[in-house]
Each structure stands twice: as structure tokens, then as C-alpha cells.
Image (cartoon, grey):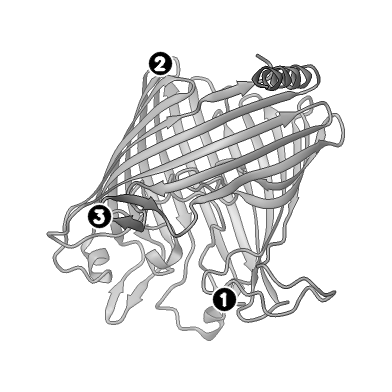
Amino acid sequence: MKTKILLSIIAISTFISMNAQFEIDGQFRTRAQILHGYKKPVIEKTNAAIHVGQRSRLNLKYQNNKIKTLFSIQDVRVWGDEDIVNHTGVKGKSYNTIDVYEAWVEFKTGEMSRIRIGRQEMKYDDQRHISWRNWWDRGQTYDAVLYSYLNKKSGWQVDLSGSFNSKSADLSGNDYSDGTEYFGNVNPIITQNFIYIKKSMSPKWYLSLTGIAAGYQKEGTKDIIYVTYTEGLHLNYNMTKKATNGIFAKNNLFLQNGKNIAGKNISANMITAQIGYRAMNKQLELSACLERLSGNNAENTDPEYLKTDHTYNLLYGGRHPYYEGYMDWFVIPKTYFNAGIQNISLNLLYKFNAKNVFKLSYNNVTNVNNIKKNTLKVSSGSSLAQFIDLTFIKKFDKNIKLHTGFSYAIPSNDFNNLKGITNPGKNYFFYTMLTVKPKFFSSNK
């Protein structure tokens, strides 16, 4: 019996290798953290939190001359957070930590075009609005249809995507709109649709245009959707895979309009810029960055001004790499009182060799508009906090990487007062993260 099973496996593997490609690989990512002021400043004599998080993924990949598929499941947990225990051992959890991370099928629709349907990762340019959010243990995927056209010879790329999300409902009848199907207080994006147009001018630089329509469901309703429109330009010079020594730069200019999650009109903008110099056979990089998100002016009481929301919405874009360093104090508008923020950073990157990289970053965050909280007032352009980030990355080989970092935050007196902290403590964050990506099986071998 065992011989028949073995012969069957060999026969199936041989058939697959002759007609298609099949791979099984995984990812084990473990991150230990010491948190003392991560995400918000702490008061004096606060104990640091210590925990270890783990992401485990299993990926099944299949491809032939017509289709391409990926099915990925993952388990995300914190060591020791099981809640089913007794005096002699740990039994497990009362809630599920396993989920489908990706599940999509892709069809070739031409020599230069394809269409992908299902749950999938998405990331464009420097991931300001559409990101895979890889710092999160769970990551970020999108249930969507994606059409992509890429002409490598001319340098043109055009991507179109559409989606519609809803809660589970009773679909036994013909009326699929029974009930409100409202998501509740979280109210995520119910539909996200975008067009992305990219033109590569040369191997060193490209220009892209993005237009996004993100819809939020009106609270307590089933058929009213407020749409936030985001459109803008990304310029990238000498920061691609074919980057060389010399000057490098990138820039984002985006506008936002339509209606926000509460149905209020929007008039907001985002400006980011980075310029730097690369030398020593790409071993050394020095750069300066500007990040600016618009917000509301608490001192402006003009009725016409108050009718409009000026706070920029990052949608599902990346936050951790930007805006104030790695302490994640200012990742959503309410953390900076919807006043808008501006971050200026100075960065150094040095590669000892291909497998050892060191990074140093200094960030200074200010508020764009006036802030008012009760009797406290903070004028625009005031310093909110300063941050220092140290990062070391070691690649043992292409499938094993160690990522270690230390961040230190210095909040201003104004920011501590706004947060109600009269006896501030030290704010720091240390982590070390090991990522291993084994390949279990490949029909090519």
C-alpha cells in the first residue's frame, strides 16, 4: 500500500513538472519587543511591556501557461496569549488565529495583460495609499479584481482595480440588501477602486499617476456610501532596482476630495519629498525627507471653513516607515488632534557588505495647524516630538534575515500637556525580528 502511495506521489509530481509549476513555501517571522512608550508617551515609573509575536504562513503556488494561483494561510499569535489553561498546562485559544491571507487566481488576457481575482497583496510606488502593511504581523490584503497591462518595451503600465465588501447576510431570497449590514464603529472601506498609470522614462526614473475612489458606508444604512477621492503624482528618480551612485529623489503630490466617513466634504492634501546622495559603490546613502499631511485649524471658526474636513486620509497606506520614525505616535489623524503633521528627517544608511546594513534616522515632528484641547492651545509649527531610530539588518542568506532596531522618543512639553502627562517618563522601543522563508517543495526540482 505504501509503495502504491509513493508511486502515485511520484507520478503526480512528474505530471506537474511536465505540464506546470507547483511550489510550496512558507514564512516564519518572530519578533520580540520591549515597549516603553510605543504608540503613545508614558508617565514616569511605568513598567516596560515585553512580548513576542509570531507570524507563520504556508503558501501554495501553481502556474501553467494559462493561469497562475496563490493560496496562503497564516497563523498570527503572541506567545502565551492562550486563554484555555489549567494548573498543569496550556490547552489553546477560544478564538481563531488562523486565516486566509491570500487566495487568488490570475488569467493571462494577452501577451502584456492579465487579470487577477481574489484576496491579494497590493503595493504601489512607496505604498502611501495602497500597501501590504508588512510591519503588521497580519499584513494587509485586498479582496478585489485587478487588471494589469505592462509594456516593458515602451515603459507603460496601467492597472485597474475594483472591489465591494459587505458583511455576511441572509441571501436566501432575491433581495440581497435586507438589513443595514453596517460594519459598526470601525467602518472599514466598503469599496476601493483605483487606476494606476506608470511611465518609465529610463531604467533610472519613472512617473506615475494614481486615482482612488474609496467608499465608506453611512452609519446605520444599507445603501448610502460616502466616497473619498484621492488623486496625485509620484516621481521616482534613481531609487529603482537599477539605482546607481549619485543623486536620488522621490516626490508625492496628492489631493483629496469627495466626502469623508461622516459625509462631510473634504479638501485635503499630502506632500512628501526625499532627496539624497549615494556613494562608495552604493555602500553609503545620505538623505533628507519631508512629510506633510494637511489638517484642520482649531482656531478657524469661519462657518464656511468648518463645513469642510481638511484632514488627510491615508486610506490603507503605509504608516510605520513614515511621519515620525518607528514609535508610531502619529499614525492616524486623531493622534495629532486632526491638525495635520509635518515631519523632517535626516537619514544615513551604510552597507558594510551585501548582508549587513546599518540605518540611522532623526525625525522632528511639528503640527501644521493650530491645536486646541480644552484650555490648552498649541500654535501651528510647534515641535511635538523628536525621534531617533537605529536599525541593523543582517541577511544570513536569501531566506534568512535578522532585523533589529532601537527607537527613542523625546516629546515636547506641549505634546505631553496635550496628552495629560505631567510627569513624563522615558520613551523607547526595542525589537529584534527573525524571518525565515523555507521552500518545502518545487516541481522544477
Q: Secondary structure at mark 1?
A: strand
Relative placement, left or right, of 302 versus 43 is right
Relative placement, left or right, of 276 versus 445 is left
Looking at the picture, which amino acid does disc 1 mark?
Thr
Could you tell me which residue is drawn at 68 percent across and 16 percent down? 444
The residue singled out by tag 2 in the image is 280
* Mark 1 vs 2, N-terminal side: 2
* Mark 3 vs 2, N-terminal side: 3
Q: CA distance from mark 3 to mark 2?
A: 60 Å
Percent across and percent down for residue 73 are 58, 43
The residue singled out by tag 3 in the image is 87
In this picture, is 300 found above or below 411? below
Could you tell me which residue is drawn at 21 percent across and 63 percent down? 413
Looking at the picture, which amino acid does disc 3 mark?
His
- Quarter of the image where the N terminus is located: top right
- Looking at the image, do the residues carrying marks 1 and 2 touch, with CB atoms under 8 Å apart? no
- Looking at the image, do the residues carrying marks 1 and 3 touch, with CB atoms under 8 Å apart? no
Q: CA distance from mark 1 to mark 3?
A: 58 Å
Q: Secondary structure at mark 2?
A: loop
Relative placement, left or right, of 209 versus 87 is right
Looking at the picture, which amino acid does disc 2 mark?
Met
Q: Residues within 10 Å of mark 3 (few under 14, many from 20)?
A: few
Please give the label number shown on residue 308: 1
Residue 407 visible, this orientation: yes
- Looking at the image, do the residues carrying marks 3 and 2 touch, with CB atoms under 8 Å apart? no
Picture quadrant where residue 234 is located: top right
Q: CA distance from mark 1 to mark 2?
A: 50 Å
